[in-house]
């Protein structure tokens, strides 16, 4: 059985995005969205040994959290190799790990096909910008590109609150303070309240997980800061509904009104394998204008899809339009566009017209 250091090095050499170490299966790597298994089947004793090795490699991190709760999230670096984000877990009585490989270097947004219309949110002076999508859709990478653009072009104080820290941002034109949940601060809402006393210009919140964090995030945006965060939703309309539904009915109108005032943009993204097997993003982009604010305030978020589809002149694009363009550019297959579309009938008709 390979040791954990060999497994990590092999993942980096193969440009794997994730490593899955689970009892009953060989070591598995995620390569361009596909699971590749390698070696012999791991027994529970094997995964326990590999987990212990990784904790020692992660600067002798204590295993108390994993032992008592069954879950532990953290990140660490191996000099000369890479950074890694780890979720250690207990399943069916055995230990396992899912390890994300994170490069030391910041992502290149051109190589990743992140459009100018997304990066332009970095130029906003205030308000709330949300990056949304399913787990593994590249939200953290997009956030890193936006923060790096700010850091490279503006003289600002940037505070990030992350769980855990993935990309490390050197100080360029800006001062970047990166805080990690549990090791540097107790929670998102505690860190957000503290951040407002630390003279920030931009605040990055790794994820809006609950009503307390959402409220604190919206409040920070109301005080004149640019706040950027993520949600596990697909589409602007679903994002608005998810935020509002996080609150009791008696509080929903208040948060709806606040959101209508501070929200500046919603970017929703998916990753799809292109014709070469590489992952390529599709983006829905909502730039909040007066019409969008009225729809949010009046509880008509379901109409945002139509607004986005008819506002291309303002830099907006729907997810289905983005997918269709990838088909037209022969980067993805029509079947993929249909499978990932939000409006199947609309996509089907457009694809038929391309034949």
Image (cartoon, helix red, strand yellow):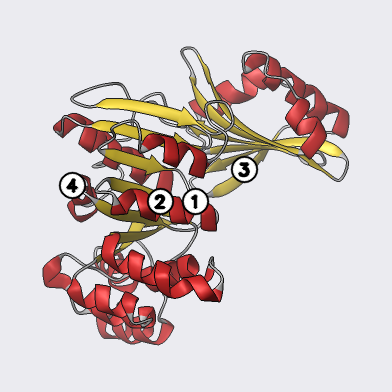
**Marks 4 and 1 in Cβ contact (< 8 Å):** no
Q: Residue at x 25, y 38 (%)?
A: 201
Q: Which residue is mark 4?
A: 125
Mark 4 lies on a secondary structure that is loop
Q: Nearer the viewer, residue 21 or 93?
A: 93
**Marks 3 and 2 in Cβ contact (< 8 Å):** no
Mark 3 lies on a secondary structure that is strand
Q: Which residue is mark 1?
A: 213
**Quarter placement of the C terminus:** bottom left
The label shown at residue 217 is 2
Q: CA distance from mark 3 to mark 1?
A: 37 Å
Image position, residue 185 (x, y; %) = 53, 31
The label shown at residue 121 is none
Earlier along the polypeptide chain: callout 3 or callout 1? 3
Image position, residue 311 (x, y; %) = 17, 75
Residue 137 makes an appearance in the image: no
Q: Is residue 169 left or right of residue 91?
A: left
Mark 1 lies on a secondary structure that is helix
Q: Nearer the viewer, residue 34 or 129?
A: 129
**Marks 2 and 1 in Cβ contact (< 8 Å):** yes
Q: Which residue is mark 3?
A: 36
Residue 233 makes an appearance in the image: yes
Q: CA distance from mark 4 to mark 3?
A: 44 Å
In which quarter of the view is residue 25 placed? top right
Q: Nearer the viewer, residue 218 or 180?
A: 218
- Observer-side mark, 3 or 1, equals 1
Few, some or many residues within 10 Å of mark 4 (<14, 14–19, 20+):
few
């Amino acid at each position: 059985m390979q040791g954990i250091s060999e497994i990590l090095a092999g993942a980096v050499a193969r440009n794997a995005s994730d490593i899955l170490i689970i009892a009953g299966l060989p070591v598995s790597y995620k390569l361009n969205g596909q699971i590749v298994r390698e070696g012999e089947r791991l027994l529970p004793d094997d995964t326990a040994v590999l987990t212990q090795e990784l904790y020692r490699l992660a600067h002798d991190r204590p295993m108390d959290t994993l032992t008592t709760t069954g879950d532990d999230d953290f990140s660490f670096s191996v000099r000369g190799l890479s950074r890694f984000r780890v979720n250690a877990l207990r399943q069916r009585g055995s230990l396992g790990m899912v390890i994300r490989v994170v490069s030391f270097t910041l992502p290149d947004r051109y190589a990743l096909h992140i459009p100018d219309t997304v990066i332009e949110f970095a130029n906003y002076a205030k308000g709330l910008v949300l990056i949304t999508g399913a787990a593994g859709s590249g939200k953290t990478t997009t956030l890193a590109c936006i923060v790096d653009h700010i850091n490279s072009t503006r003289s600002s104080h940037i505070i990030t609150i992350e769980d855990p820290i993935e990309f490390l941002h050197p100080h360029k034109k800006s001062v970047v303070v990166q805080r990690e949940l549990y090791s540097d601060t107790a929670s998102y809402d505690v860190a957000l309240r503290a951040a407002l006393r630390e003279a920030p210009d931009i605040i990055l919140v790794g994820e809006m997980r609950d009503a307390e964090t959402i409220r604190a995030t919206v409040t920070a945006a109301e005080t004149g800061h640019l706040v950027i965060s993520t949600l596990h939703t697909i589409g602007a309309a679903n994002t608005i509904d998810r935020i509002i539904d996080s609150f009791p009915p008696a509080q929903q109108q208040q948060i709806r009104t606040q959101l209508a005032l501070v929200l500046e943009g919603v970017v929703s993204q998916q990753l799809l394998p292109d014709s070469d097997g590489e992952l390529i993003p599709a983006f829905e982009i909502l730039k909040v204008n007066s019409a969008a604010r009225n729809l949010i305030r009046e509880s008509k978020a379901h109409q945002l899809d139509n607004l986005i589809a008819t506002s291309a002149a303002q830099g907006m694009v729907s997810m289905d339009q983005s997918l269709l363009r990838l088909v037209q550019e022969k980067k993805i297959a029509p079947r993929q566009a249909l499978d990932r579309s939000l409006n199947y009938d609309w996509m089907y008709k457009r694809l038929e017209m391309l034949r």
